[in-house]
Image (spheres, grey):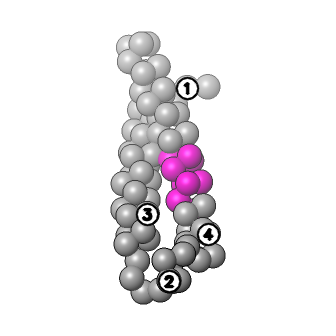
């Protein structure tokens, strides 16, 4: 299967965007002062659920970005 150039770029940009968004989110989650993420210095269920969401998003963002990168490399080789 061959991906088109626009689709490959979209997948690559999506992967990078996912990392930017979720890294920012995790930084904010760790700095949370509202009491949702930490209760007297101990992580809450809110923290663990959102950390799990971030990790899964990192993994999927990486997989999708790599697919886009491979699509672009394949197009360059055939050109």
Above or below residue 14? Residue 39 is below
**Residue at the spot of label 2:** 40
Q: Nearer the viewer, residue 77 or 61?
A: 61
The range drawn in magenta is 53-61
Mark 1: give few (<14), some (14-19) or many (20+) Cα within 10 Å. few
**Residue at the spot of label 4:** 49
**Residue at the spot of label 1:** 2
Q: Residue at x 44, y 30 (%)?
A: 69
Of the two numbered discs 4 and 1 in the rendering, the one whose residue sits closer to the viewer: 4
Label 2 or label 4, whichever comes before in sequence order? 2
Q: Can residue 25 be seen from the camera position used here? A: no
Q: Residue at x 48, y 28 (%)?
A: 71
Q: Secondary structure at mark 2?
A: loop
**Residue at the spot of label 3:** 26
Residues at marks 4 and 1, CA–CA distance in whole angstroms: 37 Å
Label 2 or label 3, whichever comes before in sequence order? 3
Q: Is residue 63 left or right of residue 17?
A: right
Tags 3 and 1 touching, CB below 8 Å: no
Residues at marks 2 and 1, CA–CA distance in whole angstroms: 53 Å
Measuring from the top left, give residue 25's x and y in whole percent: 41, 66
Measuring from the top left, give residue 63's x and y in whole percent: 55, 39
Q: Magenta region, mostly helix, strand or loop?
A: helix
Measuring from the top left, give residue 5's x and y in whole percent: 41, 32
Q: Nearer the viewer, residue 56 or 78?
A: 56
């Amino acid at each position: 299967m061959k991906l088109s150039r626009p689709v490959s770029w979209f997948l690559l940009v999506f992967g990078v965007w996912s990392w930017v968004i979720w890294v920012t989110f995790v930084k904010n989650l760790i700095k949370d002062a509202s009491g949702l993420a930490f209760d007297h210095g101990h992580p809450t269920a809110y923290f663990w659920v959102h950390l799990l969401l971030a990790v899964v998003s990192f993994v999927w963002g990486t997989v999708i970005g790599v697919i886009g990168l491979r699509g672009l490399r394949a197009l360059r080789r055939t050109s």
